[in-house]
């Protein structure tokens, strides 16, 4: 029997303490609502996966873009978005959410964050440019000063000072298991307090699910919903999502009739390594792949005929590696390339960004991030270092899996062919990777972080470095279907009274705002956008 102290009541219950849940709570406090936020994690992890992210957000036509002379518009952004999304005929709501995002990213996300003391680096970044189809036509990826940690820190500081802070009660270690549904409406939820094992019950006129997707806590769900176009899921799949992104609330909502869509649309990264300080099984770390490194399959052969290059089309990279026989890959580079271009998509490793050390950041840009590379070499079991190709191949073979061995002669041949192109000079480049690097370097935001046509087997740039990389599970692009008010819909397309879904739980809007692929930075942005929309819908009057 549930004890009295484990019975909670408010105007709104939010399930999940990530960026989407916190954004929803903040907006509700602005409207003087009484809110209960139930988070399954420890208090020290409040903020969820966003807190550990690189902190890049996609905005359209910001003051920073205009200052750099970058001409952007919602129309151009939507065209790029739809190119990567490849929406189907039935994707009406995802299309509407995408249009809403690009039209309102500055007013509803950028300005909301800057008012909470979140600032962004002056140079706008340019990932996901596309290979066979347009991606980002211009730079849109704004990196928060302080990474994702800085975003959460800024919001939480203002949250604590909110004049209605007393109206918010936060309960940690609370695992929501079921939704209370009666008379065709949601009236609350039930679950367990994981520390004590006691049951709890929370009631409210509205419940907002902000518990994340299906790509973390239970990788069997990821594999069950694996994209058929990629073939079978990899034998080794790393988890780069939140440990509680296990689909528990997806199952609970499905029990009361909620519609779920596009669960086979997933956003994974191609350059994952085993986390050196893993706290959960299969926990991975997402690298930002160096553009000047050669991407090889498990036998040491360069992917091709079109080479794999970072910052082009992440979905394509993942697909090609998944379709290779071993379903894992290697990136081969040297010290000079690594210290200039290698990065980690996480706040714990990008310390100059996270702790806002401007001089350290400037030093790393000019002289290379030796501290990061040394740390990765020391801590990671997926990285080998050598002073010859022969030695490198032998060390790589010690890490080979499932009988796939490095063919030293093939690897040496591919490296030599690449280096020979560089020796001939830029006027004679006939290698798509080098042509892309030449294009990257025309934009100053990339020029400062990309080597100037650096050969691999260059003794002046030694030692050689090889990184064994796996597919890393990251984001669910599908989820619980919602309308443009963030209200959950049933299988008939009807609103389930009192139930809302935001962030990754809702496929970042509509059950699949991204379609097949993201332009990057739209995950954090959509968490804020859908959270604010849900709160405004709940109070019944929108200023958005």
Image (cartoon, rainbow, N blue to C red):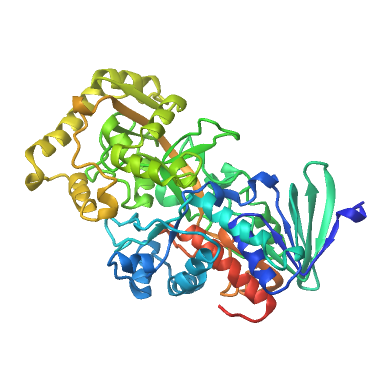
Tell me residue 56's x, y (percent).
44, 55
> In the drawing, does residue 292 fall left or right of residue 49?
left
Residue 152 in the image: above or below residue 471: below
Tell me residue 427's x, y (percent).
7, 47
> In the drawing, does residue 340 fall left or right of residue 31?
left
Quadrant in the rendering for residue 465: top left
Q: Nearer the viewer, residue 408 or 254?
A: 408
How many marks are shown on the rendered structure?
0
Q: Can I make out residue 486 in this image?
A: no
Q: Residue at x 58, y 43 (%)?
A: 220
Can you say which quadrant of the picture contains the C terminus? bottom right
Q: Residue at x 48, y 34 (%)?
A: 236
Tell me residue 299's x, y (percent).
30, 28
Q: Nearer the viewer, residue 260 or 314?
A: 314
Tell me residue 216's x, y (percent).
57, 45
Residue 42 in the image: above or below residue 119: above
Q: Nearer the viewer, residue 301 or 417?
A: 417
> In the drawing, does residue 349 fall left or right of residue 464?
right
> In the drawing, does residue 428 fall left or right of residue 240?
left
Residue 482 in the image: above or below residue 156: below
Q: Can I make out residue 243 in this image?
A: yes
């Amino acid at each position: 029997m549930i004890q009295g102290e484990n019975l909670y009541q408010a105007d709104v219950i939010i399930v999940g303490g990530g960026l989407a849940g916190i954004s929803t709570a903040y907006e509700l406090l602005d409207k003087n609502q009484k809110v209960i936020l139930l988070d399954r994690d420890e208090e020290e992890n409040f903020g969820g996966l966003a807190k550990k992210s690189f902190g890049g957000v996609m905005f359209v036509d910001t003051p920073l873009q205009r200052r750099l002379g970058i001409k952007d518009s919602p129309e151009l952004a939507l065209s790029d978005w739809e190119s990567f999304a490849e929406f189907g005929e039935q994707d009406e709501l995802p299309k509407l959410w995408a249009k809403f995002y690009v039209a309102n990213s500055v007013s509803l996300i950028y300005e909301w964050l800057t008012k909470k003391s979140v600032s962004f680096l002056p140079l706008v970044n340019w990932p996901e440019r596309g290979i066979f189809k347009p991606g980002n036509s211009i730079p849109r990826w704004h990196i928060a000063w302080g990474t994702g940690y800085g975003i959460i820190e800024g919001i939480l500081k203002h949250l604590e000072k909110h004049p209605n802070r007393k109206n918010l009660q936060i309960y940690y270690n609370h695992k929501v298991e079921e939704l209370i549904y009666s008379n065709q409406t949601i009236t609350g939820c039930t679950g367990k307090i994981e520390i004590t094992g006691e049951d709890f019950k929370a009631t409210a006129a509205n419940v907002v699910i902000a518990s994340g997707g299906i790509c973390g806590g239970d990788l069997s769900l990821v594999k069950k919903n694996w994209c058929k176009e990629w073939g079978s899921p990899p034998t080794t799949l790393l988890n780069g999502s939140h440990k509680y992104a296990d689909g528990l609330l997806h199952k609970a909502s499905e029990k009361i009739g909620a519609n779920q869509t596009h669960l086979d649309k997933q956003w994974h990264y191609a350059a994952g390594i085993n986390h050196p300080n893993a706290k959960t099984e299969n926990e991975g770390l997402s690298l930002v792949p160096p553009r000047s490194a050669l991407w090889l399959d498990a036998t040491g052969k360069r992917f091709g005929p079109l080479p794999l290059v970072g910052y082009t089309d992440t979905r394509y990279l993942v697909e090609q590696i998944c379709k290779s026989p071993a379903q894992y890959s290697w990136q081969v580079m040297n010290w000079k390339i690594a210290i200039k271009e290698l990065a980690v998509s996480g706040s714990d490793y990008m310390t100059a960004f996270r702790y806002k050390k401007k001089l350290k950041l400037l030093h790393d840009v000019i002289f290379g991030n030796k501290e990061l590379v040394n740390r990765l070499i020391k801590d990671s079991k997926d990285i080998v270092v050598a002073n010859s190709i022969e030695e490198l191949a032998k060390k790589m073979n010690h890490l080979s899996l499932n009988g796939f061995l490095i063919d030293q002669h093939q690897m040496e041949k591919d490296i030599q062919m690449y280096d020979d192109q560089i020796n001939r000079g830029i006027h004679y480049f006939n290698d798509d990777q080098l042509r892309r690097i030449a294009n990257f370097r025309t934009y100053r935001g990339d020029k400062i972080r990309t080597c100037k046509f650096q050969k691999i087997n260059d003794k002046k740039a030694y030692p050689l470095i090889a990184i064994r990389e796996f597919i890393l599970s990251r984001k669910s692009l599908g989820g619980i279907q919602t309308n443009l008010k963030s209200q959950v819909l049933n299988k008939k397309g009807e609103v389930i009274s009192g139930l809302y879904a935001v962030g990754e739980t809702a496929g970042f809007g509509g059950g699949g705002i991204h379609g097949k692929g993201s332009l990057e930075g739209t995950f954090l942005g959509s968490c804020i956008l859908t959270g604010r929309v849900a709160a405004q819908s709940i109070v019944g009057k929108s200023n958005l």
